[in-house]
Image (cartoon, helix red, strand yellow):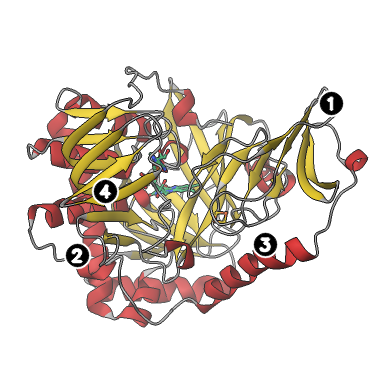
Amino acid sequence: MHSLWIETYDKKYEFPKLNSSLSCDICIIGAGIFGMSCAYYLTKLGFKVIVIEKSEIASKTTGHTTAKITSQHGLFYNYLINNFGTSFARLYLEANEEAIKNIKTIIDNEHISCDFSYQNSFVYTTNPDEVQSIHDEVSAVQSLNFPCKFVTNLGLPFTILGSCMFENQAQFHPLKYVYGLVDIIYNNCKIFTHSTITDIRKSNDNYICYTDDGNVKAKHVILACHYPFLKIPGFYFLKMYQSSSYLIAVDTKKTLFNGMYLTAKSPTLSFRAAHINGKDLLLVGGADHKTGTYCNFEASYGVLEKVAKTYYPNCDVLYRWNTRDCITLDKVPYIGLYSHYMPNLYIGTGFQKWGMTSSNVAANIIVDMICGKENKYAPIFSATRMQPIKNRDEVKNMIVQSTKSVVLDKINPSYLKFDDIALNSGGIVQINGNKVGIFKDSRGQIFAVKPVCTHLGCLLSWNDVDKTWDCPCHGSRFDFRGKNLYDPAIKNLETYQIE
Ligand SMILES: Cc1cc2nc3c(=O)[nH]c(=O)nc-3n(C[C@H](O)[C@H](O)[C@H](O)COP(=O)(O)OP(=O)(O)OC[C@H]3O[C@@H](n4cnc5c(N)ncnc54)[C@H](O)[C@@H]3O)c2cc1C
Ligand code: FES
């Protein structure tokens, strides 16, 4: 299921596949908003840049986002002050506020038409038990000298008890923005799509980035591939997991409200409007869960549709989509050097579902590192930081899930019987002592895969909403034919012929 953004954008370009050996100053792996922001800044500075994309430009997380451009990342600043201190929280806020300005400057300077509009952003509650946490957040943000307000009178079609408001935040059409960047650098930067980097090796002062059909030699490499496929060194698979969320775009047939909204606590609900092809649509997001854990239609799109129908009984649901993003253990993105053992290799990841601004922060930090310039925000995001873990619940969750998938499920699996798998559904069965992942399409055709993740070997689980095989360990995803869709895995699943 593709997003509203992808469905409503006519791409102007087709890029070739990499099939030769090339060299450049900087190789960027991944053409989402982060990779293309780096490509934009570096090409403008005169560097010779090559971008290698596994799929198509902005077709993964960036193409499936909600596209709010804001420094309000939930009830976050009270958490940051309590865990990292006031100056850390102030730098985080400043970095993200600067990112909003940077994005607007690029849009203005380059005349990018991407439906950018300034909006107020609200984190709200309808639950009396949560009102105090809103007051706490407002005080925390005000203590950082940022003019946020406690407000109760919002444009939403239901009563709220309190909200924290950030003014002058924004929203846009993410594909129009990213392709706008492509327009500017098209003639000065080489872009290759449908080319997967499978390995990166050091060669004297350079790196060589390999695909199956060609390679790129570069002094600097930026991993803009969302969840890094490199395992060692770096060990990002021990310090990051992925969380999925769902979105619907609805024609409410009513005049829509301004502003961008997010619930203060779980269950998450997110709202914004978008003006698409002459129509105002309401985007409703939420139903998040750790990627790879069980979910069905009722618990995902069903929840969002129920909310939309409650307030707009005659609404039509026009688009449904979902994606996932990387969450770090302390909730702060990893930006900078990938590992102390690999100089000139950089990463920006763990954007926590706030990658519109975080990707701009990351691009600026990494561009400054490449240019040898100091960046005052770099230390707080350092990707190689070693700090006491602030988020014990997430660590426990990750360890339990990985142990269950790598060890317990393999020793003590719960198999289905082949005949119990309904048409248009899937599950794991045992055939001749082997675990086999089966999908039966609506005509009864059978697709069989080895349901073991090609990243680090966790047992996959069947996702009946998208008809995919998903990994509960670090969030890789594969289609029912075994084709790798989402990182960090890069290889397809083994397939079986079933008679
Ligand atoms: C449901 C949802 C809603 C969100 N809403 C918002 C929002 O309102 N505001 C906000 O700020 N953020 C939001 N986010 C977060 C934001 O969308 C992401 O943080 C951001 O898009 C990540 O961009 P990226 O460029 O890092 O990753 P991606 O867009 O995933 O780009 C990475 C690219 O790398 C490519 N790649 C991967 N591996 C390789 C390889 N080996 N070789 C070559 N290429 C490779 C991929 O194909 C992909 O195109 C949301 C996230 C989710 C899940
Ligand atoms: S994503 Fe890491 S084992 Fe599957």
* Disc nearest the viewer among 1 and 2: 1
Residue 318: % across, % down: 59, 27
Q: Which image quarter: residue 208?
A: top left
Answer with the quadrant where ligand 2 appears in the image: bottom right
Location of mark 1 (residue): 444
The answer to whether residue 206 is left or right of residue 451 is left
Q: How many angstroms separate mark 1 from mark 2 (CA)?
A: 55 Å
Residue indicated by mark 3: 405
Count of marks, rendered view: 4
- Secondary structure beneath disc 3? helix
User: How dense is the environment of label 1, judged by Cα within 10 Å: few (below 14), some, or many (20 and up)?
Assistant: few
Q: Is residue 498 left or right of residue 87?
A: right
Nearer the N terminus, badge 1 or badge 4?
4
Would you name the residue on which mark 4 appears? 222
Residue at horizontal 77 percent and vertical 65 percent from the top: 411
Q: Is residue 330 above or below residue 479?
A: below
N-terminal of the pair, mark 2 or mark 3, is 2
Q: Are marks 1 and 3 in contact (CB under 8 Å)?
A: no
- The N terminus is located in which quarter? top right
